[in-house]
Image (cartoon, rainbow, N blue to C red):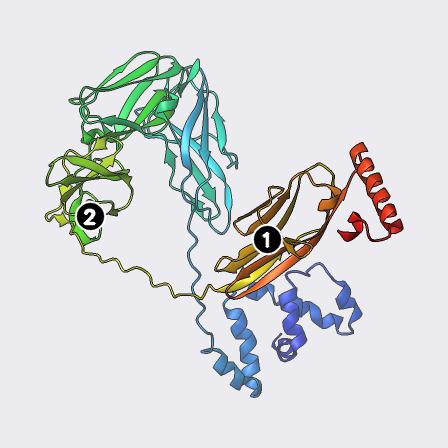
Amino acid sequence: MTGKTAPPATDPAPEKEPAQTPKEEPAPAPAAEEPQAPEQPPATEQPPAPADEPAPVPTAEATPASEEGSPAPPAEPQAPAPEPKPEKPKAEPPSSPLSLAVEEVSENSVTLTWKAPEQTGRSGLDGYVVEICKDGSTDWTAVNEEPFLSTRYTIPDLSSGDKIHVRVKAVSANGASVPATLEQPVLIREILQLPKIRMPRHLRQTYIRRVGDAVNIMIPFQGKPDPEVIWTKGDKPLDTSRINIRNTQKDTIFYIRQAQRSDSGKYELAVRINGAEDKATLDIRVIEPPGPPQNLKLVDVWGFNVALEWTPPADNGNSEIKGYIVQKSDKKSGKWFTALERCTRTSCTISDLIIGNTYSFRVFAENACGLSEKAAITSGVAHIKKTKTSYQPEKIPQRDMMEPPKFTQPLTDRTTTRGYSTHLFCCVRGFPQPKIIWMKNQMEIREDPKYIAMIEQGVCSLEIRKPSPFDGGIYTCKAVNPLGEASVDCKLDVKGKIGREDRGAGLLAGLLLFSLSQCCGLCLFCVD
């Protein structure tokens, strides 16, 4: 046996076969393929012997290797070589379920709801286990045989009239969590109507009252049978010496005769029926006028203006400061007048003060309750001094305004009808003001009632009253001043039919010319 066992110790193939024999015991096929089939059965019979003692198996394989000499040296350093493996962190069980509550109670069952735990661990959550215990006992029994993943469960087959305590555990591969337990035992009886608080709309926001006012609040609810009503403030019972609570089957009344600032806070209302409950929060704020502003200072005085600064009041009256009212008082009258309303900053500038007067200033703080009872008054006064001012007219440089005449708008040719008055216009400028001379056919028009000449703001006009064909011709407007002269011309054409008198005069003139042409030159006409 020893001779047969030595060769398999030196060959690597027999070393692998013992490791594979537990998995390939019923496989005779590879033994039939090799020529050394008769020697393998003893080798296969050896593993069962060391299987009884798993510790000596590696030592038996190492001893023959050490006898040969060559494998022995590497075997010695391998013994002390194993490096210490880092310790794995211990897996923690999941945390307890959250918000365990009773959803429904009947004559023989209870329906529970809860929320998943915050921490489930690396392995994940296997499910939940629900346990119950009768009131007065300490024996907890599991309701479900295997964990389930739903966060809602109904406990069946309960006896009507019993009181039971309920708890829920979260279970994973690392263990079970700390159980979540209902605070009150559940009475097994049918709930005809679950508790429900009907919080009025105006109470869903902060309810504000003034110091000394009465607080009288009625909150309706529903539930059958008659629910249990519990009021708390900060998880503590209410002070019955200040707060009166009156409950009926359908509502609860919260009453404070004279509210104080200490009554401010959040009040919790709970309505319970056999473990099922509904909660609501009532936020009450009792306010009063704020204190006066602090550190009012007169920062600067200049001209008609004063600059003020201050800091918010130390006591805001349990309400936000909406603004400040700034008032001024004249030393002469002694009366206070509002200078600024609802100033939202802690500084301001007062303007339009009267010269020579002395002013004092005060500031009120304002919140939702009103103005502060007292005001902050400046310690000093502001005197608006009268400053001497001297008027110095602006020096305007003299400009030479002398200018020779110049027509900016010339005369234009006109055609008019006999017997209808007409006007000739032109524009001229110059300094000193030029003299205007009107001429007809280079002859100056002097005092003639037929012509009316005018000049206004540099506009020259000549009116010709009821012109005749003989009034037509070249009209000239001439402007003259010490620096020079200028002129413009136009042509006037007068048209119209010749009347009977004109025809007679023309005929007489024609006969006269004819007679003169035949005259000897010695008659009276010729002499003249």
Residue 404 percent coordinates (x, y): 53, 64
Identify residue for label 2: 310
Disc 1 secondary structure class: strand
Q: Residue furthest bottom?
A: 69
Left or right, residue 341 beside residue 292: right
| Residue 427 circle label | 1
Q: Is residue 369 above or below residue 383?
A: above
The quadrant where residue 191 appears: top left
Image quadrant where one finds the N terminus = bottom right
Compare marks 1 and 2 and give the one earlier in the sequence.
2
Q: Is residue 348 above or below residue 234?
A: below
| Residue 380 circle label | none
- The amino acid sitting under disc 1 is Cys
Disc 2 secondary structure class: strand
Residue at the (63%, 48%) spot, across then down: 425
Q: How crowded is mark 2: few (under 14 residues within 10 Å), some or many (20 or more)?
A: some
Residues at discs 1 and 2 in contact (Cβ within 8 Å): no
Residue at the (74%, 38%) spot, across then down: 418
